Image (cartoon, helix red, strand yellow):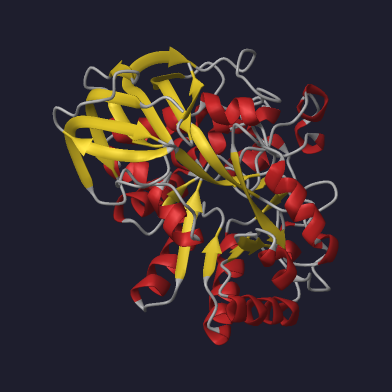
């Protein structure tokens, strides 16, 4: 394979906490060297970076569909695939198949279904699925309602040293709801559930995880109470991490105005107080990961009355640009943002990547953080362009993307 030399790049290595100018050499599918004034072999390709950012390829810690084109457009080289597939990833053969879905252009890291058919009752064979490549176990789009089943799951996963990924909404409180209780749900006449449904579920799962000695990851924190519960547990030394999605840091329930079904998400959008708390949680590291929650839906799924529309939105192609909005707003410095989308999920789930160290996989992202563009749902690459950010101006364009040393973009 031909070597590639990036010259004069802004090298940001979130795993090492470094941010400096220099060169980077790729050879034999790995990072061969970094420094200044590096020399390359005669047949190497030279990429003049011109001071643009060179970082590890993004690792998206929550996707519901393997959407290779959308991932590549967003600078993503690796995704953690939730078990909510058809059929659910509750069998070793299904996990093996899921892992191959993105090849050769995308690393797919499956999360095993916690229960058979994701029914919340009978535990799946986690050990067998771990043996064939599952990097964690997840409850899927819904929480496990039965506390006894959840405790058994946490104990089983702890014995295997698997991270348990949970959905943070109490199903008894959210049954039939499509929005967060408050002014907008009342004004629009939408079935709603209190924001406290998240805190109730997080509090229960934190206590059970402490009892089981399990490693816990909250897939999407979206409320002030949820952020505070995770913050307090981390301060007490509990092994818990959390993620959120750009929508919960950039949008609030006001996006539902006009019954905009593209803004029907899971969990639903919250109020401004919650949005501010999510941003604060990202800023202080309580929320350590930013994920797309990529869940593309068809026009038929979304062009429905709000209460009938399917929840979810496309997110891979816009993850980098929307994340950079937090940098431009002063919420996060750029190295911290890149850590939230690469080195932190890599470390938490034991994945390769997320680093510019010599010998690390050559999964690399070269991008211009200041290049402006406007999100257009009709032209987003991938399975579907349903996004609540349609028409919003953003900045940050992928210039080049490598996976295992092979160029995916341009």
Observer-nearest residue: 133 or 223? 133
Q: Residue at x 77, y 71 (%)?
A: 125
x, y percent for residue 363: 44, 37
The answer to whether residue 310 of the structure is visible from this angle is yes
Observer-nearest residue: 199 or 282? 282
Please say if 278 is above or below 158. above
202 on left or right of 284: right
Please say if 98 is above or below 254. below
x, y percent for residue 276: 39, 46
Q: Residue at x 14, y 27 (%)?
A: 37
x, y percent for residue 145: 74, 70
Observer-nearest residue: 373 or 25? 25
x, y percent for residue 237: 37, 78
**Which residue is the extreme one toward the left?**
37
- Quadrant for residue 259, please give it: top right
**Which residue is the extreme one toward the front?**
42
């Amino acid at each position: 394979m031909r070597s590639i030399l990036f010259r004069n790049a802004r090298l940001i290595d979130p795993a090492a906490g470094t941010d400096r100018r220099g060169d980077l050499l790729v050879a034999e599918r790995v990072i061969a060297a970094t420094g200044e004034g590096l020399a390359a072999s005669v047949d190497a390709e030279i990429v003049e970076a011109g001071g643009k950012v060179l970082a590890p390829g993004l690792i998206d810690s929550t996707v519901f569909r393997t959407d290779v084109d959308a991932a590549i457009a967003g600078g993503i080289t690796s995704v953690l695939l939730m078990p909510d597939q058809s059929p659910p990833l509750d069998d070793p053969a299904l996990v093996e198949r899921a892992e191959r879905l993105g090849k050769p252009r995308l690393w797919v890291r499956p999360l095993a279904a916690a229960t058979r058919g994701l029914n919340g009752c009978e535990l799946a064979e986690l050990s067998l699925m771990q043996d064939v490549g599952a990097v964690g176990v997840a409850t899927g789009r819904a929480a496990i309602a039965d506390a006894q089943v959840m405790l058994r799951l946490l104990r089983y996963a702890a014995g295997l040293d698997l991270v348990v990924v949970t959905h943070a909404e109490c199903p008894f409180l959210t049954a039939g709801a499509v929005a967060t209780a408050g002014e907008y749900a009342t004004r629009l006449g939408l079935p709603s559930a209190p924001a406290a449904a998240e805190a109730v579920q997080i509090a229960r799962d934190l206590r059970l995880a402490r009892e089981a000695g399990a490693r816990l990851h909250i897939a999407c924190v979206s409320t002030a109470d949820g952020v505070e519960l995770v913050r307090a547990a981390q301060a007490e030394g509990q092994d818990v991490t959390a993620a959120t999605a750009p929508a919960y840091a950039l949008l609030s329930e006001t996006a539902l105005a006009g019954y905009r079904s593209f803004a029907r998400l899971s969990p639903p959008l919250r109020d401004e107080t919650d949005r501010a708390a999510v941003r604060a949680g990202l800023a202080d590291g309580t929320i350590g990961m930013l994920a797309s929650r990529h869940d593309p839906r068809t026009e038929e799924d979304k062009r429905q009355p709000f209460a009938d529309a399917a929840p979810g939105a496309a997110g891979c192609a816009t993850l980098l640009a929307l994340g950079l909005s937090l940098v431009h707003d002063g919420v996060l410095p750029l190295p911290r943002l890149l850590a939230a989308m690469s080195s932190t999920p890599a470390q938490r789930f034991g994945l390769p990547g997320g680093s510019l160290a010599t010998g690390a996989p050559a999964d690399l992202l070269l991008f211009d953080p200041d290049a402006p563009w406007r999100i257009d749902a009709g032209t987003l690459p991938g399975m579907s362009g349903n996004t609540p950010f349609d028409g919003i101006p953003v900045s940050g364009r992928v210039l080049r993307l490598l996976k295992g040393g092979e160029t995916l973009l341009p």
